[in-house]
Amino acid sequence: MSARTCGFKSRLAHVRGNPITAQALIISLEIIGVIGFALSGIIEAARKQFDLVGVVMVGFIAAFGGGTLRDVLLDRRPFFWVEQEFWVWALIGIGLVLPFFFKSRHIDLTEKAILVPDAIGLGAFAAGGTHVALVSGASPMVAVLMGVVTATVGGVLRDVLVNEVPRAFHDHQPYAVLAFVGGWLVVLLSYLEIPQSLDVLIGAVVIVLLRLASIKFGWELKRWKFL
């Protein structure tokens, strides 16, 4: 085994040896991701004029869908939202109050309104999901894929529930690709033994900024065309 590989495994062992710090970091990122995706789901459901139950359910699935599937695939228990039950109640409260807030302030819920919270959720969940998988003992490739799953599945389920083609598949702008690239950035920074309080945060911020830049400047992936 090479010295670099040993160093990477030692890095992961170091993370496992500091459960309080690692847990605080994971919780912080998951809170940011949950809020971002919950807002995107609530706004999208409110745009479609769902009732309050529908608004809360879409927000819940958008916020927790990707992380739940990640935990299932990694055989990780309890699920992250079961472990942090407070945020379930907080999400229900936000889902009940936010539509009335939008209405009272006459805020126009356009399609663009969900792009910023969606980008924040993408970055937080992609970086955090990769970190969780690495700490669980997954290989770098599997960890990155778990980050992609964490970051994209909730948004896909949200769009399906509101009867839209998932934005991640059809808007041609980088989305899952950014989660994949950002996941590898987290792996690289871990490999380089960047302090664990920074590697995931750097990965999350880079993903968010790239996603917002792709929206602002209209970056698109090459479209698949049949001859």
Image (cartoon, helix red, strand yellow):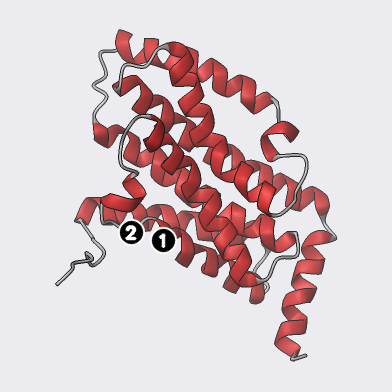
User: Which residue is at a point 49% across and 20% down the rendered structure image?
Assistant: 56
Q: Which residue is mark 1?
A: 178
Number of on-image labels: 2
Residue 41, picture quadrant: top left
Relative vertical location of residue 5 with respect to residue 107 in this rendering, above or below: below
- Under mark 1, the amino acid is Leu
Label 2: element kind: loop
Residue 217 % position (x, y): 20, 56
User: Which residue is at a point 63% across and 42% down the rendered structure image?
Assistant: 68
Q: Is residue 129 left or right of 182 when viewed as pictured?
A: right
Q: Is residue 147 left or right of 27 when viewed as pictured?
A: left
Nearer-the-camera pick, 101 or 139: 139
Residue 193 % position (x, y): 68, 73
Label 1: element kind: helix
Q: Is residue 194 visible?
A: yes
User: Which residue is at a point 72% across and 83% down the rendered structure image?
Assistant: 5
Residue 63 % position (x, y): 53, 35
Neighbours of disc 1 within 10 Å: few (<14), some (14-19), many (20+):
many
The answer to whether marks 2 and 1 mark residues whose Cβ atoms lie closer than 8 Å is yes
Residue reaching furthest to the right: 17
- Under mark 2, the amino acid is Pro
Considering the image in quadrants, where does the N terminus appear?
bottom right
User: Which residue is at a point 29% across and 55% down the rendered structure image?
Assistant: 213
Residue 174 numbered tag: 2
Considering the image in quadrants, where does the C terminus appear?
bottom left
Q: Is residue 124 left or right of 225 when viewed as pictured?
A: right
Residue reaching furthest to the left: 227
Nearer-the-camera pick, 49 or 12: 49
